C-alpha cells in the first residue's frame, strides 16, 4: 500500500485554510484505494455520509454551480432545478471540470478555486454531521472540516438536495 505519509504535502487547499485560520485536519489514505466516497470513508474510518461528494453543473447557471452531498446520498433532480430556477441542468464533462476547477474528478477541493458568480449548494443533511471529509486536491489526501465552516468558506446555500419533496411541501 502506497501513501505519502512520510512528509505532509502542502496543497493549495491547505494553504487557503491556513491563511484564513480555518480549523481542519489532514488525513491520508492509500493511493490504491478505489475511487468513491464509500471507499474513502472505509479507508479513513468514517461513515460514508461524512465524505462529501459533489457535482459540477455546467449549463445550470452562467458561471456554473457546485452541489455537495453526503457520499451515501443522491441528488433529487427536481430539488436541483428548483434551487436554480431552471430545468436546464447538465453534469459537466470531466474536461470541463478540469477547465473550471483546475482539478481532475476524484479529489477536488470544495473551495479556493471558484470564480466570482460561482454558486455552491450544500445538502441540509450534511449540516447534521459532526465533521465532513472533502478532497484536498490529490488522490490520497482528505481534509476533515466542520460542516458550518465548509458552508461558510464556500459561500454555500444550504438546502434540501437529497430528499424528494411532496408536491405539498415545495
Image (tube, rainbow, N blue to C red):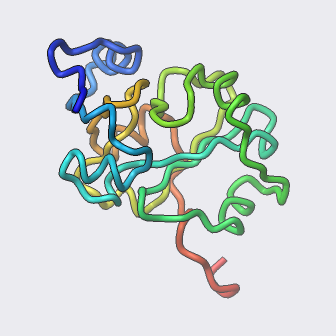
Q: Residue furthest left?
A: 6
At 49% from the left and 21% from the top, the residue drawn is: 112
From the viewer's perspective, is 25 left or right of 56? left
Is residue 165 or residue 3 the one in the foreground? 3
Is residue 150 or residue 51 the one in the foreground? 51
Query: Picture coordinates of residue 126 (x, y %)?
Result: 38, 57
From this view, report whether residue 94 is shown above or below residue 165: above
Query: Picture coordinates of residue 104 (x, y %)?
Result: 56, 28
Specify the quadrant of the image occupied by residue 26.
top left
Q: Is residue 50 visible?
A: yes
From the viewer's perspective, is 34 left or right of 166? left
Quarter the N terminus occupies: top left
Q: Residue furthest front?
A: 1
From this view, report whether residue 151 is shown above or below residue 159: above
Specify the quadrant of the image occupied by residue 29.
top left
At 31% from the left and 34% from the top, the residue drawn is: 142
From this view, report whether residue 13 is shown above or below residue 86: above
From the viewer's perspective, is 66 left or right of 146? right
Is residue 85 or residue 52 the one in the foreground? 52
Q: Is residue 24 visible?
A: no
Amino acid at each position: 500500500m502506497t501513501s505519502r505519509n512520510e512528509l505532509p504535502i502542502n496543497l493549495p487547499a491547505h494553504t487557503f485554510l491556513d491563511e484564513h485560520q480555518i480549523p481542519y485536519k489532514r488525513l491520508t489514505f492509500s493511493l490504491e484505494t478505489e475511487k468513491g466516497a464509500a471507499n474513502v470513508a472505509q479507508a479513513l474510518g468514517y461513515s460514508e455520509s461524512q465524505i462529501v461528494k459533489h457535482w459540477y453543473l455546467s449549463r445550470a447557471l452562467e458561471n456554473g454551480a457546485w452541489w455537495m452531498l453526503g457520499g451515501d446520498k443522491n441528488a433529487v433532480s427536481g430539488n436541483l432545478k428548483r434551487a436554480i430556477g431552471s430545468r436546464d441542468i447538465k453534469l459537466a464533462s470531466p474536461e470541463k471540470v478540469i477547465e473550471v476547477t483546475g482539478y481532475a474528478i476524484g479529489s477536488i477541493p470544495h473551495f479556493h478555486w471558484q470564480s466570482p458568480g460561482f454558486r455552491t449548494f450544500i445538502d441540509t443533511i450534511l449540516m447534521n454531521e459532526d465533521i465532513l471529509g472533502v478532497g484536498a486536491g490529490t488522490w490520497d489526501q482528505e481534509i476533515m472540516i466542520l460542516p458550518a465552516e465548509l458552508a461558510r468558506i464556500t459561500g454555500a446555500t444550504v438546502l434540501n438536495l437529497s430528499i424528494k419533496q411532496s408536491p405539498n411541501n415545495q
